[in-house]
Image (cartoon, grey):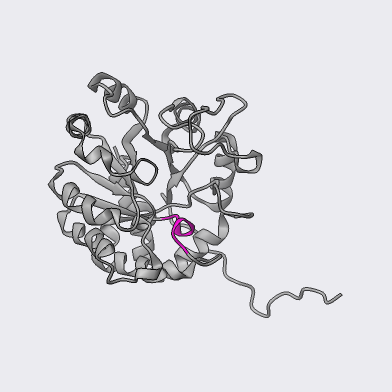
Amino acid sequence: MTALRPASRPPRVFTPPPGATDTHVHVFDPARFPFRADTPYQPVSYEHGAATDLAAVLDAAGVERVVLVNPTSGYGDDNACMLDALRKLGPRARGIARVALDTPLRELASLARRGVVGVRVDFVAGGLAALSDPVFDALLARLVDVDLLLDVQAQGAQWTELAPRLRQYPGRIVVDHMGRPDPARGLRDPAFRALLSLADSGRVTVKLSGAMRASKRGPPHNDLDPFARALLRAYTPAALVWGSDWPFLRTGGRTDYGPFLARFEALVSDARMRRAILATTPGRVFGFER
């Protein structure tokens, strides 16, 4: 058997800057918060991760702050597990909730008082039917009233229809997973161009996260690198944040945290840009500086 020899030059360990923030993680604690039977996927045991597990991962990586996104899988519109994690993690954490479209203003305000800074709408799971629903428009108006972000998960061709609607929306928007572009269609895809066109609105922030959600390749999913660079040019670090998507649901195999930070460092080589994306911009967008 051939021994594995250390590299002649050990790889440099990337140290995140002060205030570094992971803006896209989920918590799954089914022992205390059972999964809902009506969700499209229920995470298996190796995909579970409670608040204490998350804190250990963040501390080991040198990531000080985190944004918890209530997941479509497992919990859907049940935010109890996420809210419990917000309480345990304290000031280092903020939350993105999932709610029914007809959720009243008082419930949204209650969520905001408990550390929630936005509401997620998952068009990947639910399709675009909500765009023609007056109840959806009413929810958007209430989000503006309580100053909650609209967190959007959409993919591929959905952006052709979605981007014009979002341009008309006066509130603040965060886009998950680089918009989940289609690598086969390339940078000139009208759908990806539609997402890029929102950069001049001044109200949209994009997460450099979840490359595995759209990639056609295995790790490090570098077929998404051109899209990340295009977003960097269009949005600039003032409207970009980073997220890991821990604990990595439905990735088809073991996935670890460190390589995602390393990939981010490789994509964004300038230290000032990295500091903006990892610390300054998420501090402002998700209310950590308040």
List x then y, in percent, for residue 98: 37, 33
Residue extending furthest toward the right: 1
Residue extending furthest toward the top: 106
Query: Quarter-wise, where is residue 42 in the image?
Result: top right
List x then y, in percent, for residue 245: 48, 49
Residue drawn at x 54%, y 49% is: 248
**Is 169 situated above or below 243?**
above
Assess whether residue 261 is covered by the magenta stretch: no
Query: Quarter-wise, where is residue 133 in the image?
Result: top left
Residue drawn at x 55%, y 41% is: 54
Query: Where does the C terminus fall, quadrant-wise?
Result: top left
List x then y, in percent, for residue 93: 43, 37
Query: Where does the N terminus fall, quadrant-wise?
Result: bottom right
List x then y, in percent, for residue 208: 38, 58
**Is 239 situated above or below 24?**
below
Bounds of the magenta segment: 209-215
**Is 2 situated above or below 199?**
below
Say whether residue 112 is left or right of residue 28: left
- Whether residue 235 is visible to the viewer of this picture, yes or no, is no
Say whether residue 139 is left or right of residue 251: left
Residue drawn at x 30%, y 57% is: 157
Assess whether residue 211 is covered by the magenta stretch: yes
Residue closer to the observer: 87 or 228? 228
- Whether residue 168 is visible to the viewer of this picture, yes or no, is yes
